[in-house]
Structures are given as structure tokens and as C-alpha cells.
Amino acid sequence: MREIPFSPLPGRSAEYYTLLGWFALMVAGGLGGAWYMEHHGHWVTGMSNEIVWGTPHVFAVFLIVAASGALNVASIASVFGRVHYKPLSPLSALVSLALLAGGLAVLVLDLGRPDRLIVAMTTYNFKSIFAWNIYLYTGFFVVVGIYIWMMMEWRMNKYKSPVGVFAFLWRLTLTTGTGSIFGFLVARQAYDAAIMAPMFIILSFTYGIAIFYLVVVSTYTWSERPLGDFVIRRMRNMLRIFVAAGLYFVIVFNLTNLYATEHHGVVRFILLDGGVYTTLFWVVQVFLGGIVPLVILFQPGLGHNRQAIGLAAALVLVGGVCQMYVTIIGGQAYPLVLFPGMDVSSSFFDGVVASYTPSLPELLLGLGGIGLALLIVTLAVKLLPFLPDSLADADMDRRFHPDEHAAHFDEDDEEEEPQPATKAA
């Protein structure tokens, strides 16, 4: 296999610095929102004693889950031996670290007292899933950072496969821990389900590959580097499989809750009587974020169009944010069941569905985390050689199958039929 040339983005175009400025402005807005909430107190937000995890947590969990899935391309190359994904492995690991950094930044700045993080880092309650996640998140930076080193330093390439396997297992554990935050909360009827851990793993694949597709296509289009159809089709195939799997787990999750009598109330609340949460679930999460992307990705005409695939990926991400909103906010809005089988009412709003309206500082902080992730990626590809010089079909063919025709990469498409081999006379 020929050596793959990598190089940073050249030049100092005005468009690049304009993009950098927009991302920096998003980060500044997030810092401003965090300062406003910290200075005035969280009473200026939509959060309350009933809903203590607001919109910033929605963005934070979404970015953390997506970070695990963005590493999927690198894992496929190193762990499962699919060498076609090798050129994109360094970028995959970079996007993964950037998303995690953005998510954790939102999480820390939403604490109200970020300095209290020192207490969480020095005093551990190992019966708490939150304490476990501190190790999982910080360890992810270390593991993936070493993984990038193994991939980009040719003298260390021989170690990248075992390190890749370790990174793959770590990311599964990380997403399991994030899903278990909700699965272990038995007090909330909307959570309290062991299936949330594997469901979060599947969702991480979905969100991660959608973000990675948009990053790859945008970067190669704006930098005018060759990007062949083979890479596009491979990412499309992964995306449609994970979107379908994500919808499957959502169905199973709700059917499981319907089987348990104690969860009937919250399932009815989310699916029928939840107002804005019901609307977000059916219209945005299921229809726009699931069914429409599947139609686009499986439809022969649209499924081969890069802009249409990009639209499907964007819809998946919008649906994913709404899914986290319904899960986190809607799960808290449903009243706690203090006495099963009894109607509970008091002056403390017991038995009442909690109201919540996101405030501007919360939205700015959440968008600031996205801006930070994109800013990290934009700077990194400019300063370091994360990008292959070419992902054109002809170049991919010469690198990985020098003795075969480029049509070898169209084996999963309907348009081309394999030609029979001819025997020399």
C-alpha cells in the first residue's frame, strides 16, 4: 500500500479567517452567557428546583455522545481492518476530541460554581456514575491523543492497531457511562432503564458520523481538494444504518416502558400529552430526524447526491438535539411519583408537570460549546497535517488496490455490474 500524503490547509484566505471569526464569536457568546448566569445566579435561566438540567446540558450530552461516535471511522480502519477508512482516521480522532472538549466546556460552565469542579476532582464517591465519568472523559483525551500520535508518527505506526482497539473499547465504555447516568436514576420514570446505555451507543454512532460527514465535505469543498464518490458512499451507508438502528432502539425503549405499569404515565406524557415534548418527539426527532433522512439516504436519486446527503445529516443532528431535549428536559418535567397509585398535591408543585422555557444565556452557552468544537477543528487542520491531500476515487484505488480498476469501490451500488474476468490466450 502506498504512503498517504497528508498536509495542513495552505494559504491565508479571507474566507478561512471569516469562518474562524464566526466560530470565535460563538465561543465568546457562550462565555458571555456563562458569565451572566454565574454573576446573577441560575434564577435568570429557565431552570428551577424541578428542572435542574437545562438546555446547556442538552448540548453538553449531545456533544459528548457525538464525540464517541465521531471516532467510529478511525475504529473501523484500525480495529476492523477496513483500510479504505485509513486516510480519514486522524481527522476522525481530531473531530472526536474537539466535540468532547466542547461538550465538557458547556458542562463545566453550567455548574453555577465552576470552581467546585476541584471538589469533584479530589473527592470521589465511587457509588456515583458521575464520579466514574470524570475518569472516562479525562481518560478519553489521553487515549485518543496517544492514538493520534500512533497514526501520525510513522515510527509508531506499528502500535496503532492495539491502541486503536483500546480506544474503541474506551469509547464504548464512555458512552455506556453517559447513558447510564439516566439509566441508573430510578427516581425518574422517564429514565430508569438499562437499555439506555446501548441506545446511547447507537445514537453516538449516528450523531458522530453525521457530524463527520459534514466536516469532511465542507473542508474538502472549501479547500478545493479532491473528494471522490467512494468516500461519500461509504459514509452514506454507515449513516443510514445507524439512523435506522437509532429509530429501532427508540421503539424498543418505549415498548419496554409500556410493558412496565410504573412507566405508563410518563410514556403517555411523552407520546401523547406532553405538549411541546410530544411535538418535538414526533415531528422533529422521529419524522424530521429519522424518517426523512432514511427516505433521502435510501432513495436512489437523492442517496447519491452530496447536498441531499448533507441535508439528511443536518436533519439527523437537529433530531438528535431534540431527542436529548425530550429525554433530559421532558424526563424532569414529568412529576416524581412519590406514592405510586396515589394522587399527590402540595404547595411545592408535587404532582404538577414542571414548566421550562430556555433562556438566551442558556442557548448561548450551548451554542458556544458547538463553536468551540468547530474552532478546534478549524485551527487544527490549518496547523497540522490531519487531511489527506486527495480522496479522489482514482487515488484511493491506486493506494489500496493498485492492480484493480476503480470500479472495485462501487461494489455496493446498483449502477455498475462487475465485468467477468477474461483469460489470456
Image (tube, rainbow, N blue to C red):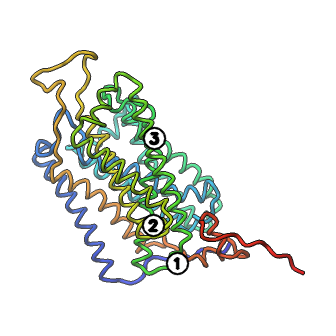
Q: Secondary structure at mark 1?
A: loop
Q: Which numbered disc, 2 or 3, marks the residue that appears first in the sequence?
A: 3
Q: Position of residue 136 (x, y in %)?
A: 44, 43
Compare residues 142 and 314 and report the one nearer the observer: 314
Q: Nearer the viewer, mark 2 or mark 3?
A: 2
Left or right: residue 86 compared with residue 190 = right
- As drawn, the label of residue 249 is 3
Residue 282 shown left or right of residue 69 in the figure: left
User: Reading the chain from its start, which is encountered first: label 3 or label 1?
Assistant: 3
Provide the residue designation for mark 2. Answer: 302
For marks 2 and 3, give the CA distance: 26 Å
Asked if 4 appears above or below 319 in the picture, the reply is below
Check disc 1 and report the residue beneath it. 389
Q: Amino acid at mark 3?
A: Phe
Looking at the image, which is closer to me, 292 or 97? 292
Element at label 3: helix
The residue under label 2 is which amino acid type?
Answer: Leu
161 sits left or right of 20 in the view: right
Residue type of the residue flagged with mark 1:
Asp
Residue 234 image-quadrant placement:
bottom right
- Give the Cα separation between the discs numbered 1 and 2: 28 Å
For the residues labelled 1 and 2, say whether their Cβ atoms are less than 8 Å apart.
no
Density class for disc 1 (Cα within 10 Å; few <14, some 14-19, many ≥20) is some
Q: Is residue 128 above or below residue 329?
A: above
Residue extending farthest right: 425
